[in-house]
Image (cartoon, rainbow, N blue to C red):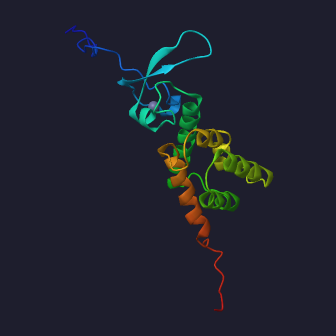
Amino acid sequence: MTEPTSLTGNVRPLRPAAAVLPCHLCPDDDQALADPMLTVTFRAGFGPPRLVSLCSLCYLGRPSRKQTDLGSADLAWRALEGDVTRLLAGHEQGLWNPSDGELEFAAGLARMPWSEESMRTAVREAHSLAYAGRLVRALDNNAIVVPRHVPADDRALHSLRRLVDLLATEAERPREGSLQASSG
Ligand SMILES: [Zn+2]
């Protein structure tokens, strides 16, 4: 028997009518497929504006969702969203354990109204107090840019709100091993 043994000989590649592209806004390590119906105008610093497709998360969540152009706030939001999502997942899996300083920083964020100015001040103070950790790094600049373009309760900030509230709750909880007998 000398039949060809190639298993791939009979496999026909699937050829969709139109190629499905990755979302233009998603970062490389967290990329979703674009919906060809959800297009925005992307103006690079050079060359003519062109239409690009986004995934529904980016299309509906981005700060400039009411505009047909992809804005710089959208880029900042997507980077922030990616960082925050990674921190949430890392924390859930026990891979990221924020320091007491970071928990306190998050508790402060949870209490204050969010605006470009308040975020800028909070991040600057966190740096000067040497709280610098993954949380502060994730917020730096992107969490200052996004509130410039959206109100504090905008859905563009929902993931960050979820993370901050989670950490703020932890900050209030007595740590294991640090329980002290209190004589009431
Ligand atoms: Zn996307």
- What is the residue that sits farthest to the bottom in this orientation? 184
**Left-right relation of 32 to 11:** right
Quadrant showing the C terminus = bottom right
Residue 144 found in image quarter: top right
Residue 155, position as x, y percentages in the image: 47, 45
Can residue 133 be seen? no
**Left-right relation of 110 to 50:** right
Q: Foreground: 50 or 148?
A: 148
Residue 139, position as x, y percentages in the image: 64, 44
Q: Foreground: 48 or 151?
A: 151
Task: Give the residue displayed 49% in from the left and 48% down from the top.
Answer: 158
Is residue 72 depicted above or below 101 in this figure? above
Quadrant showing the N terminus = top left
Task: Give the residue displayed 50% in from the left and 46% down from the top.
Answer: 154
Is residue 48 depicted above or below 77 in this figure? above
Residue 128, position as x, y percentages in the image: 80, 51
**Left-right relation of 6 to 31:** left
Can residue 60 be seen? yes
Q: Foreground: 97 or 156?
A: 156
Residue 103 found in image quarter: bottom right
Residue 58, position as x, y percentages in the image: 45, 34
- What is the residue that sits farthest to the right in this orientation? 128
Q: Foreground: 166 or 92?
A: 166
> Total marks drawn?
0
Task: Give the residue displayed 57% in from the left and 40% down from the top.
Answer: 80
**Left-right relation of 162 to 130:** left
Ligand 1, what quadrant? top left
